[in-house]
Image (spheres, helix red, strand yellow):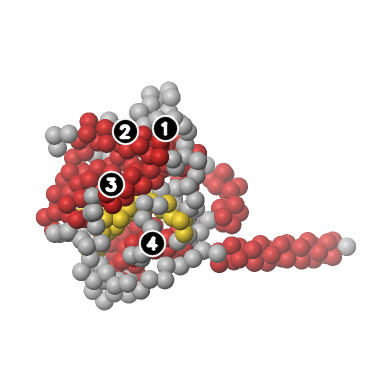
């Protein structure tokens, strides 16, 4: 009787596992691939992020794709050891016989690092064709950047916006420059009115700050694209929601027990880094798609209730004010 029971249980578990695997594969099949075969020979691509977590894995995948297409690619991150390790990984996994890839130091939380990085980049390159603002932090303990901004907002939004501003003249040198802001679906959790002030430690909520920074990315990208179009500047701006990516070290701030309990959910709903990179490649490589939009899975996402003209103007005004106050005189 016990053997029959065990056999019955094993049969049910096996059938359930096969059924789950079937639905998982069906779910994964819905993710689209970038179909562009465009060459990037002669182009310079800058990808921020390359030290840890999502930015490292996604940055490496994007860099491999760019290098394989012939682009000169720069990985920018705070850690030299991890950055050079990322370069070695990219070279090892690239199909290009002579990959053009380099690493430069960049800490988006440091005013001096931002300015030094820009000068170092300009000393080596004359133009910039694609800027991918990929670096970011998630659920970070309370901290403030060297320029006085809450850490999530600084690293995820203010730093990238200031970097984009620094590179405007170099982007103009390209006939078809692209600026990419990597956002997150968590932006829908941001609260109105949008508060970009630095909270006190007692008021701090890491989920709120992360969501606000990612909403700010999208709204600022929308506004920046409109600004460029009105000035007839050859620069297109996109924001992208890559999706829930597995194995990105985001769980390093959670208990092992919680991660264990969450594993089935994570496995089923998460996607690979290669899947997540497709929408980014789509926006980088396709020339005839609408800019100033939020993309996911190579498609434009419908404007949510937070993506309003009023919120856009509010975020632009606050972002420009923070940058002016934080970086004036540099």
Q: Quadrant of the C terminus?
A: top left
Farthest residue, direction left: 123
Q: Position of residue 47 (x, y in %)?
A: 29, 56
Counting residues from the start of the chain, the first of labels 3 and 2 encountered is: 3
Q: Tell which of 262 and 163 is nearer to you.
A: 163
Q: Residues within 10 Å of mark 1 (few under 14, many from 20)?
A: some
Residue appearing at x 14%, y 54% in the figure: 122
Name which of mark 4 and mark 1 comes first in the sequence: 1
Within-10-Å neighbours for mark 2: few <14, some 14–19, many 20+: some
Residue 189 visible to an observer of this rendering: yes
> Helix, strand or loop at disc 3?
helix
Cα gap from disc 4 to disc 1, whole angstroms:
29 Å
In front of the other: 283 or 59:
283
**Res. 80 visible in picture:** no
Residue identifier under label 3: 227
Q: Nearer the viewer, residue 35 or 27?
A: 35
Residue 32 x, y percent position in the rendering: 49, 65
Q: Which residue is mark 1?
A: 194
Q: Earlier in the sequence, mark 4 or mark 3?
A: 3
Sequence-wise first label, 4 or 2: 4
Task: Please name the residue that numbered disc 2 is placed on.
Answer: 318
Image coordinates of residue 326 in percent, x first then y, are 23, 33
């Amino acid at each position: 009787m016990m053997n029959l029971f065990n056999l019955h249980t094993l049969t049910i578990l096996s059938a359930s596992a096969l059924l789950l695997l079937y639905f998982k594969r069906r779910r994964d099949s819905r993710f689209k691939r970038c179909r562009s075969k465009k060459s990037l020979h002669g182009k310079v691509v800058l990808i921020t992020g390359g030290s840890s977590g999502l930015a490292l894995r996604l940055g490496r995948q994007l860099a491999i794709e760019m290098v394989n297409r012939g682009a000169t690619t720069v990985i920018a991150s705070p850690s030299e050891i991890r950055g050079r390790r990322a370069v070695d990984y990219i070279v090892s996994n690239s199909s290009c016989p002579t990959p053009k890839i380099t690493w430069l130091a960049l800490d988006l939380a440091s005013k001096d690092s931002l300015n030094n990085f820009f000068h170092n980049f300009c000393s080596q390159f004359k133009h910039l064709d694609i800027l991918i603002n990929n670096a970011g932090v998630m659920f970070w303990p309370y901290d403030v950047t060297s320029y006085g901004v809450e850490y999530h907002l600084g690293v995820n939004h203010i730093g990238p916006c200031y970097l984009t501003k620094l590179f405007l003249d170099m982007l103009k040198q390209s006939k078809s420059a692209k600026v990419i802001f990597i956002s997150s679906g968590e932006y829908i959790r941001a609260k109105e009115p949008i508060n970009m002030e630095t909270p006190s430690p007692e008021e701090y909520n890491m989920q709120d700050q992360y969501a606000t920074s990612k909403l700010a990315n999208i709204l600022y990208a929308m506004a920046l694209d409109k600004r460029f179009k009105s000035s007839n500047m050859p620069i297109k701006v996109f924001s992208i929601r890559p999706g829930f990516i597995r194995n990105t070290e985001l769980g390093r701030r959670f208990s092992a027990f919680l991660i264990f309990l969450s594993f089935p959910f994570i496995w089923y709903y998460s996607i690979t880094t290669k899947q997540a990179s497709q929408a980014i490649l789509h926006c980088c490589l396709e020339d005839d798609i609408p800019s100033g939009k939020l993309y996911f899975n190579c498609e434009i996402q419908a404007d949510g209730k937070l993506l309003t003209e009023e919120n856009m103007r509010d975020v632009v005004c606050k972002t420009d004010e923070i940058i002016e106050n934080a970086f004036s005189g540099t």
